[in-house]
Amino acid sequence: MLSGIKIVEICGIGPGPFCAMHLADLGADVIAVERADAGAAGKAPEGSVLNRGKRSVVADLKTDEGRQLVLRLIESADALIEGMRPGVMERLGLGPEVLQAVNPRLVYGRMTGWGQSGPMAQAAGHDNNYISLSGALYYNGTPAEPPSSAITMIGDIGGGALYLAVGLLSGILRARATGKGTVVDASIVDGSAHMLQLLLHTRKKGLVVGERGKNVHDSSHFYSTYRCADGNFITVGSIEPQFYSLLLEKLGLKDDPRFAHQWDREMWPDQHRAFVELFASRTRDEWCALLENTDVCFGPVLSPSEAALHPHNVARGVYFERDGELQVAPAPRFDGKRTTPGRIPLRGEHTALIAAALEDGGSEHCWKAC
């Protein structure tokens, strides 16, 4: 779907490489500029699974040779991705003004935790720090425990990589219409805060009322996670009355007066305790046999290895193994077809080939020839 879009990635960690991989999965031509890594003598440098579908070159951006490589690559690129702290690319002589002087239609994508400006812009941080500041961590977990982060999911990927991808593609559309590039400031704080908009909207419906421990997702009995007899877990999310009624029917509780009033919040603690005891009486597999594939709104809590073997995920080809690693197939799908991701290159595998193409025919030739 993104065939013909050319991306230069200045490799870093986390959301930037994931964003570039996502675009490569969808057909973009991505050249990853990595740091040289000698590794063990005589051993081929290992490639990262986040580099699948890309081509890899190594360069030292502190040298003139490394900077010149990037300048040549972006001459005909649509976008650049970098994840340095604010000001680092400028100090390397590769900031937006320099690169857009070479290529005015370049979309310059900047991926950070705190953003390019603000009092915390220069501070170190990680996923859980960014989403705690943005408000996105607050409602995770139960009131009895500290808020728990789904590592990388909410911040690095949800609020970071995917927002950067949308920003880059928006910028590319604008550049193709106007010939003018832009600078995309993708901040995990901004993105993860924006993701709260749906949750904030549910306040009008009474699903979220304010503080932790008094909301549907963290105190009700009908939307929760439960431990089973074998130590595994299952989830129920029977919010709507018809789904709640079916849940009670399946559990043999349809005529139990304790559960007659779904939305009486005063009763939720006792109802939840009753469900805890009930779900602890059978194994996860037994609950799956009873509740899966019904309108109860049910799902088992699976590890990634278990999820790879679940019949639904197998039927859709969600997971696969390649290069000795468990991987996830590209998403979304187009016209009902799965996209096959490219292979994982070795670090610097394409350095010589791309350098030769730049020398022989220039930047455009490099993208076409390699």
Image (cartoon, rainbow, N blue to C red):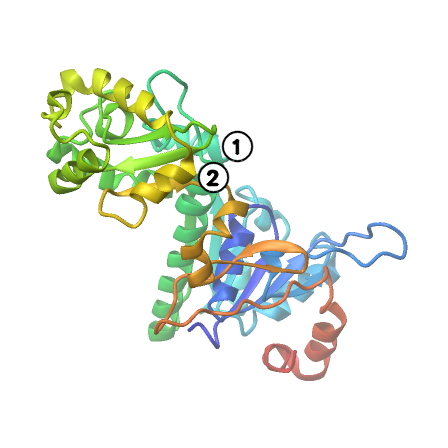
Compared with 23, 205 (above or below) is above
| Left or right relative to 244: residue 191 | right
Label 2 belongs to which residue? Answer: 113
Label annotation for residue 125: 1
Q: Quadrant of residue 53?
A: bottom right
Specify the amino acid type for callout 2.
Gly
- Please tell me whether mark 2 sits on a helix, a strand or a loop: loop
| Left or right relative to 92: residue 151 | left
- Name the spot of residue 270 as percent of width and height, x first: 22, 16
| Left or right relative to 254: residue 273 | right
- Name the spot of residue 96 as percent of width and height, x first: 51, 57
Compared with 238, 81 (above or below) is below
How far is mark 1 from mark 2, CA to CA? 7 Å
* Among the two numbered marks 1 and 2 on one chain, the one whose residue lies closer to the N terminus: 2
Specify the amino acid type for callout 1.
Gly
- Name the spot of residue 121 as percent of width and height, x first: 48, 35
Q: Quadrant of the N terminus?
A: bottom left
For label 2, count other residues whose C-alpha is less than 10 Å away and answer few (under 14), some (14-19) or many (20+).
many
Q: Quadrant of residue 225?
A: top left
Comparing 150 with 229, the one in front is 229
